[in-house]
Amino acid sequence: MTQVMAHRGASKVEQENTTLAFRRALDMGADAVELDVRRCATGELIVHHDAKLSDGRAIIATKKTDLPVYIPTLSEALDACGSMWVNIEIKNDSSEPDFDPSEQITNEVVEFLRQRGSIEKWLISSFRRETVDTVRKLMPELKTAWLVMTVDNAELEIVAKQMAEQGHCAIHPWVKSLTEQLVITFHKHGLKVNTWTCDNASRMKELVDWGVDGICTNVPDLALEVLNTPR
């Protein structure tokens, strides 16, 4: 059964990556939430998509007390998600000011989740393969997924086999590049396919027909409506 993952919460109706957006997604009946985690200057793990604020300040150079009040800590965000499972994307891009090749942020996120418990509720994802590979080494019981824009058809088997051997549980491909063949190949190797970001009902129906495991969307209410419509 395809699950509905609220992209940064119910971000069509509430400000993204806020406790309001996460609670709204919970109220709508979403199965999961996707959110983005970064570190600020004082070391707290906070939830925000971009590396910089709208005024140009880099989050990594800004104290927690100087951040806008709507930006939650990871702890506050997870509290707001209630019973939903959470896809925690670690932002660690080499083009951004908070790039962390030493994977300190990854170590801190893993340790935070270790202390928090309920390990089965969390999935760690990242566009940086080294980041999710690091999670596997630090805490193999944490679920991990690799975020990708695309995977060449010629490499599907190789990538799926390698990810399965390393213990990752899913791949998260961009919906515009997702093919049914990718779904078939990764399922064959025991991996789930959660795609992002789809807000179109007809495309959602196609994804459900393909057997996609999760649809990350800004409109979880629409996705739930599609899933509950007799086929």
Image (cartoon, rainbow, N blue to C red):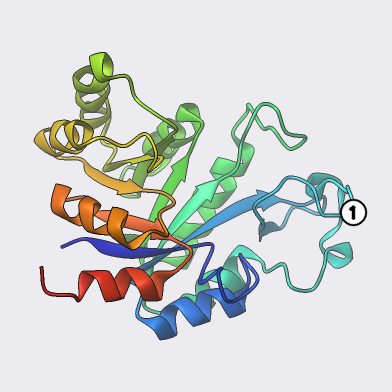
Indicate whether 28 appears above or below 71. below
Of residues 90 and 33, which is closer to you in this image?
33
Q: Which quarter of the figure is the N terminus placed in?
A: bottom left
- Measured as percent of width and height from the top left, residue 196 is found at 41, 49
Indicate whether 115 appears above or below 152. below
Quarter assignment of residue 220: bottom left
Residue at screen point 89% across, 63% down? 66
Give the amino acid at mark 1: Asp
Residue at screen point 14% across, 53% down? 209
- Asked if residue 84 lies left or right of residue 168, the reply is right
Quarter assignment of residue 208: bottom left
Residue at screen point 67% across, 69% down? 72
User: Residue extending furthest front?
Assistant: 202
- Measured as percent of width and height from the top left, residue 69 is found at 79, 73
Residue at screen point 39% across, 28% down? 150
- Measured as percent of width and height from the top left, residue 79 is found at 52, 77
Of residues 12 and 63, which is closer to you in this image?
12
- Asked if residue 120 lies left or right of residue 189, the reply is right
- Measured as percent of width and height from the top left, residue 86 is found at 42, 62
Sort mark 1 into few (<14), some (14-19) or many (20+) by Cα contacts within 10 Å.
few
Residue at disc 1, secondary structure? loop
User: Residue extending furthest top?
Assistant: 154
- Asked if residue 64 lies left or right of residue 202, the reply is right
Q: Which quarter of the figure is the C terminus placed in?
A: bottom left
Indicate whether 5 appears above or below 135. below
- Asked if residue 102 lies left or right of residue 41, the reply is left
How many numbered marks have been drawn onto this rendered protein structure? 1
Q: What residue did someone put label 1 on?
A: 55
Indicate whether 12 appears above or below 48. below
